[in-house]
Amino acid sequence: MNKILENSIEKKVVLEARDLKKHFEISKGIIKREKVNVKAVDGINFKVYDGETLGIVGESGCGKSTTGELLLGLLEPTAGEVIFNDVNLSKMSQEELRLARKDLQVIFQDPYSSLNPRMTVEEIISEPLIVHNIMKGKKLKTRVKELMNLVGLQEHQLKRFPHEFSGGQRQRIGIARALALDPKVIVCDEAVSALDVSIQAQILNLLKKLQDELDLTFVFIAHGLPTVRHISDRIAVMYLGKVVELADKNELFDNPLHPYTHGLLLSVPVPDPELRKDDPTTMKGEIPSPSNPPSGCHFHPRCKFATEKCKELVPEFREIIDNHYLACHHPLIKEDNEVFDTSND
C-alpha cells in the first residue's frame, strides 16, 4: 500500500463525497401516469486519498456508475457535495469546471462504443490536448507517441481506426486518452468487465504500473470482488444507493461485518461448490426497486439477522473499528465458518 495511506497524519484527501444524493424522476404506470423518484444514490459519504485506489462494488443497479458520474461532475447532485481539492464541484463556474476536468478523467466500460469509430487512434488521443489548447504540431505528435508507448501500443498503429484493434488494445487506447491531460484522479467505470479474463489481468497490471509511475489516484468501480481486491487499497460496498461498508481490502475480505458483504463474498465462485457449507448470510430474493426502497435498513428484507429495529430505523454509517465503517444495526463476526450477531440489542 502507498506509504501515505499507512500514516493517517499524512493522508491528503483529493476527492470526497458528502451526503451525496442523486434522484431521478420517472413516470410510472400505463393508464394513470404518476411521477416517482428513483433514488440511485441516496446519501453516501467517503473520502478518496492521494495515491490510493478506492474500489466500489455492489450488485447491478446499486448506484455505482451514478456515483462515478457525480464524482466527475457529469451529473448535478440532487443534494450533498463532491469536494475536489477542497472545492465543491457543483459551486464551480463552467470555466472552473472545465479546468477541473483536466484533473478528473474516466475510463469507460465498453472500449469500443467509447471511441469514435471515424477517428484514428492518433486523433482520439490528441483530442483532449487540442480541446484544452495545451499543445499542437510536433509537440502534440511526440506526446501522442509517448502515450502510446506508455500503454503498450506501437507507433505504427497511430493511423488505424478502433475497429482494427482487439478489445484489450481498444481499452489501452482509452487509457492513453485518459492520461493525455496528466490527471490527478481517474474513475474506472467497469473498465475491465467487458474483457476476457486473461486480458483483464493485463489491463489491471497496466493500471497498477501507471499508478506507481505517474502517482495516480483511482476510483475503481466493478461488480467482481476478486478484480477489485487485486487493484484496490480500500473497498466501499454499495447497496441500493447507499454505502453499507467501507474498509481496507484485506480487512473487508477477512472480517466483513455487514450481512450484505458476507453474501457478496459467498457469491464468488469456488472450484468445488460442494465444499462450501450452508451459511446463514447467504442472500435470498432480489434487490428491491430504487424507486420504492424498503423502510429502515434497505437490506432487511433479504437479511436473516433483521429485527424490528432494522425495519424501522435507518442505520447510521459509522466507524466500528479503526478505519472500518459500517451501516448496520447488527454487525457480524465470523469465526471457524460460523457467523455470530455481535449486537447487544
Image (spheres, helix red, strand yellow):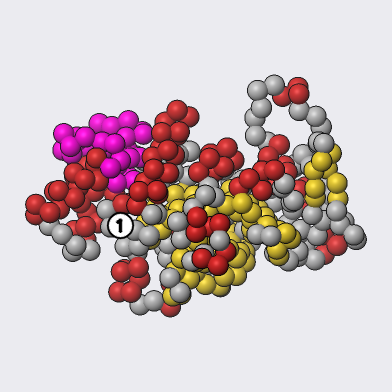
Q: Residue at x 51, y 65 (%)?
A: 10
Q: Position of residue 157 (x, y in %)?
A: 19, 34
Quarter holding the C terminus is bottom right
The residue under label 1 is 182
Q: Which residues are magenta?
A: 150-176
* Residue 240, above or below 203: below
Q: Residue at x 57, y 42 (%)?
A: 229
**In this rendering, position of residue 123 left or right of residue 233:** left
Q: Residue at x 53, y 53 (%)?
A: 54
Q: Position of residue 66 (x, y in %)?
A: 51, 57
**Can residue 284 be seen in the rendering of this structure?**
no
Classified by dominant secondary structure, the portion drawn in magenta counts as helix
318 and 189: which is toward the camera: 318
Q: Position of residue 161 (x, y in %)?
A: 22, 37
Q: Position of residue 48 (x, y in %)?
A: 51, 61
Total numbered labels:
1
**In this rendering, position of residue 123 left or right of residue 46:** left
> Quadrant of residue 129 in the image?
bottom left
* Residue 102, above or below 213: below
Packing grade of label 1 (10 A; few <14, some 14-19, many >=20) is some
132 and 164: which is toward the camera: 132
Residue type at mark 1: give it. Asp
**In this rendering, position of residue 119 left or right of residue 37:** left
**For residue 274: magenta?**
no
> Quadrant of residue 270 in the image?
top right
**For residue 155: magenta?**
yes
> Quadrant of residue 187 in the image?
bottom left
Q: Residue furthest right?
A: 345
Q: Residue furthest left?
A: 137
Determine the secondary structure under disc 1: loop
Q: Residue at x 45, y 53 (%)?
A: 218
